[in-house]
Image (cartoon, helix red, strand yellow):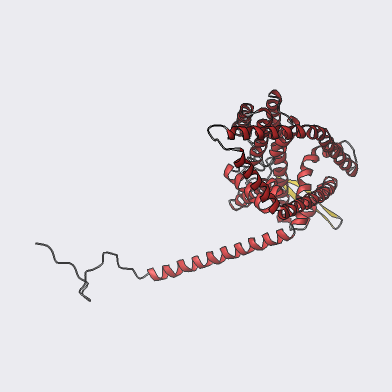
Amino acid sequence: MTAAPVTDGVTGGPRTEAPAPDEGRGARMQAASRVLATASAQFLLITAAVVVLGYVLGKLWVILLPIVLGLLIATVLWPPTRFLRRHGWPPALAASVVVVVFLGAFGGLIAAIAPSVADQVVELGDQASGGLQDVQERLQGPPFNIDEQQIGDAVDSVINNIQGNAQNIASYVVSGASAVGNGLINLLLALLLCFFFLKDGTRWVPWLSAQTGPRAARHVAALSYKTWSTLSEFIRQQALVGFIDAFFIGIGLWIFDVPLVLPLAVLTFFGAFIPIIGAFVAGAFAVLIALVDEGLTTALIILGIVLLVQQLEGNVLQPIIQGRGFNLHAGVVILAVTAGGSLAGITGAFLGVPVAALIAVVYRYIRDELDGRNPEVHPGGTRARLEGGENGAVLTSEQAPPDADVPTGPATSG
């Protein structure tokens, strides 16, 4: 005999199995709604601030780009400039000599590469034509059995498409020439700003700290030094990794008699400054030229050499050389390069990782400050202090409080 269902006594229907609400549910729901509304409003305000900041930076990009490039070049040229200044050279003279030597070295490298490129490009063009003829003959034979008329029709179709888009191609050429001109102007401005950074850069942090209060000054100074250290570390690490990649890949190209060894090695070196993607593009160029000049077998060998060198770089060199690096995951690096490239082309791809590293430095500094870890304290147990009066301000060092956490790792580690 089955038991009668329990009813609610009002409608006569079956009673629900859900528990009855207590008297505090409404008040707690109202409190949760207020918290959710406050968090949503804060999120919308932060999003609006980020959008406005991005808009302003986009409008000021023409000014910011030479500044950023000048800072990156200054990180490379500061060590020799500092050496000359420590040996009694005036700041202006030391900065001038270092910049002129840098320009001379860069110009000499271009002058050394240009003749070999001009000579071998013609030869590669002839070999590419021969390679296309060989491909055409292979297509006419088994198993493809494509007759000459079909190949000619396909070539004519490609030519007609190119002629039909001649106006668009011309506009792309004009845009490319304009981009090259703007790039040269930005490079000249960056070099000029680099000279002033090298000459007067030591005054920047004291001046910036003097615009704040005494308590904020030490944080401004510490964060300025950390960001500068991060930029310098990035340039040094990528330059060393790029040199090692270029050296071993260049040796492989030279052994197998692939043309344009020096230009490809230089391309590999500069490609290292766009992590992951730059190495892939430089390696693809090397394999393509090996395929055109030496054939499929040599191209596969060069591909193996490129992959081997890149695997050694990623699994051996990077952990050793960048052991004191930025703690940026490879996924973050790829996203930073992709985002920078989509926003500002090659320049954005180059600047994507340094900008991401600087954002990570600022985030970690704020995080450590919120956690009470005293990120403004140097590993030696000192921190910056702003002193001076109406005649000027200067940064000095003071001993941190005994209860302050003293970092044991590098300034840029997380």
State the residue at coordinates (29%, 65%).
Answer: 19
Residue furthest toward the bottom? 10
Q: Is residue 100 visible?
A: yes
Q: On the rendered image, what quadrant is the N terminus found in? A: bottom left
Establish if 200 lies above or below 323.
below
Q: Which sits in the foreground, 206 or 346?
A: 346
Q: Which sits in the foreground, 368 or 298?
A: 298
Establish if 147 lies above or below 354.
above
Residue furthest toward the top? 255
Q: Which sits in the foreground, 194 or 408?
A: 194
Q: On the rendered image, what quadrant is the C terminus found in? A: top right
In percent of width and height, residue 398 lies at 73, 46
In percent of width and height, residue 281 lies at 66, 39
State the residue at coordinates (54%, 32%).
Answer: 142
Query: Left or right of 220: which side holds 6?
Result: left
Query: Left or right of 10: which side holds 40?
Result: right
Q: Is residue 217 visible?
A: no
In percent of width and height, residue 71 lies at 77, 47
